[in-house]
Amino acid sequence: MRRITQLGFLALLGSLLAACSSSGTIRVYVEPTYEQDKLEQLLAAYPELKLLWHPGSEDVSLRVEAARLPASVRTLRAVVRARARRTGYEVHAIADLLPRKSREALRARWVNSYSRGSYEDNFPDILHEVVLEAARANHRDFQRTREEVERVATTLPPIASP
């Protein structure tokens, strides 16, 4: 009987911790990449995200890398992965950075693993949405693999050069 009580307590504690992280601040660790500092600056503008300087206690780890493209393609492509530490749930996205007009925020056309189609948005908003989605971890009905996201991204028509 005592063992059931301990298991029940652990289950209750786990659900309370999950509720706290889902309703409050999401702790984010940006994994080391070439532009780690810049990514942290972009995410610092969102008050519900708390950036951590060291891994270990994060809710979501975020990794952004440049994708290798053929020399004939003149756009930049970012591969984004956000992983929930507690559940292991991963969100994948690929963003093709659009040519910038003067003083316009950095925009990108992107596809992701948790919704159908492609979208256009500001790059910081894309990073924010991917982190939030990884923290939610509730898309069991529709989830593309990383390979599917890459395949969809490569079928998009090319972006015109600036």
Image (cartoon, rainbow, N blue to C red):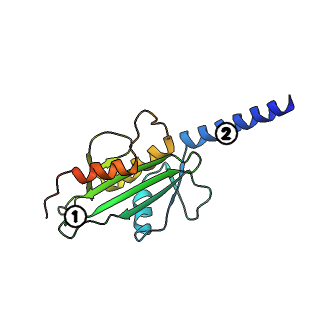
Q: Is residue 99 left or right of residue 34?
A: left
Furthest-top residue in this view: 1
Please tell me in which quadrant of the rendered image residue 44 appears: bottom left
- On-image quarter of the N terminus: top right
Amino acid carrying label 1: it is: Thr
Q: Residue at x 80, y 35 (%)?
A: 6
Residue 90 on image: x %, y %: 47, 48
Amino acid on which the number 2 mark rests in the picture:
Gly
Relative image position of residue 8 (x, y in whole percent): 75, 32
Position of 123 relative to 118 (above/below): below
Answer few, some or many: residues within 10 Å of disc 1's Cα (few below 14, many 20 plus, some between 14 and 19): some
Residue at 47% x, 50% y is: 47
Report the side of 72 relative to 123 (left or right): left
Does residue 5 lie above or below 102 as drawn?
Answer: above
Element class at badge 1: loop
Kind of element beneath mark 2 = helix
Quadrant for the C terminus in the image: bottom left
Residue 22 in picture, x, y percent from top left: 54, 40
Regarding residue 59, the answer to whether it shows in the image is yes
Give percent across and percent down for residue 21. 58, 43
User: What residue is drawn where x is 44% and y is 44%?
Assistant: 133
Residue beneath the point at 40% across and 36% down? 142
User: Which of 1 and 126 lies nearest the eye of the viewer?
Assistant: 1
Which numbered disc flags the more N-terminal residue, 2 or 1?
2
Q: Which residue is mark 1?
A: 75
Q: Residues within 10 Å of mark 2 (few under 14, many from 20)?
A: few
Where 28 falls versus 129 (above or below)?
below
Residue with the mark numbered 2: 14
Determine if residue 125 is in view. Answer: no
